[in-house]
Image (cartoon, grey):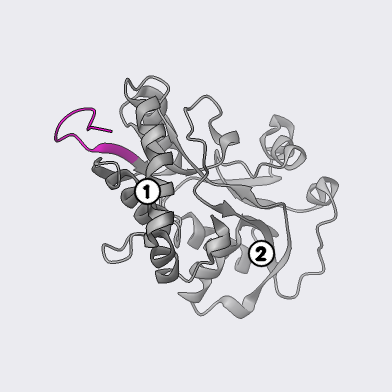
Amino acid sequence: MARADAGEPVKISISPWCPYICEDKAAPGVLVEVTAAALLAKDLDSSFTSLPWLRLMATIKSGAMDAVLGIAKSDAPDLIFPSHSIGFYQPCFYTQASSKWVYKDVSSLRHVRLSVLKGQTVNDQEVDDYIHDESTRRGAIDFLSTENYLTQHFRKLALGRVDVVLDDARVVSHHLQQTTQANQFKQVSCLKATPIWIGFSLVGKHSKAYAMAFDEGLNAIKKSGQLKLILKKYGIEETMF
């Protein structure tokens, strides 16, 4: 596939979510490196712009950016998606190490104050319905939206301002490894793993072509062994793809 616009990169919105998307030029994140490699395999350059989650979603819906990376289809079902996902994420619940709380089903959440990233879904219909139900927002859920939301998650959990944090297992593990707090918290249980996607703007004139190029490029880097090398760099097993 030739470039849709000569010299114009595919403009992709991202939000920090390391090790998937990181603020490190040498190791920008497994999703960033895989996406860039897949598009380059089809002669498409890419550029990545980091934005807070809610702004990121606004740019893709307006067409200001060509794509958004690192989402569930349930986050923005009206986007144009390729045939292949770009891995999986594992939403899990975290509490203070001394907590006796356990997750059995969505009714378990009605007895705790939950901390989540505003606007994000976990692809579990009952949990998503509970989180986004207007009636549960009065003190039951703490919605975070800043780029340092992970730090806020666990600072509030340590102080007892929230009881439970819900986020991806790899992301939480990576975050806590950078702190001295890891032994203060524990993973309680996890929801079903769900695919991560790159979604292309519904109003972008090249979106369908970009989605097709991504699929073809991903297959190409799988066959060449480049995908395996990228995953190895981040310590992620190939079965994630």
Mark with earlier residue (2, 1): 1
Residue beneath the point at 43% across and 40% down: 215
Q: Say whether residue 160 is magenta.
A: no
Classify 105 as above or below 238.
Answer: above
Q: Quadrant of residue 222?
A: bottom left
Residue beneath the point at 57% across and 36% down: 73
**Residue furthest toward the front?**
223
Mark identifier at residue 35: 1
Residue 108: give x, y in percent of width and height: 83, 52
Mark identifier at residue 160: 2
**Viewer-side label of 2, 1:** 1
Q: Is residue 125 left or right of residue 178?
A: right
The image quadrant where one finds the N terminus is top left
Q: Which residues are magenta?
A: 1-12
Secondary structure, magenta segment, majority class: loop
Residue 33: give x, y in percent of width and height: 35, 56
Residue beneath the point at 53% across and 63% down: 238
Residue beneath the point at 63% across and 76% down: 184
**How many numbered tags mark residues here?**
2
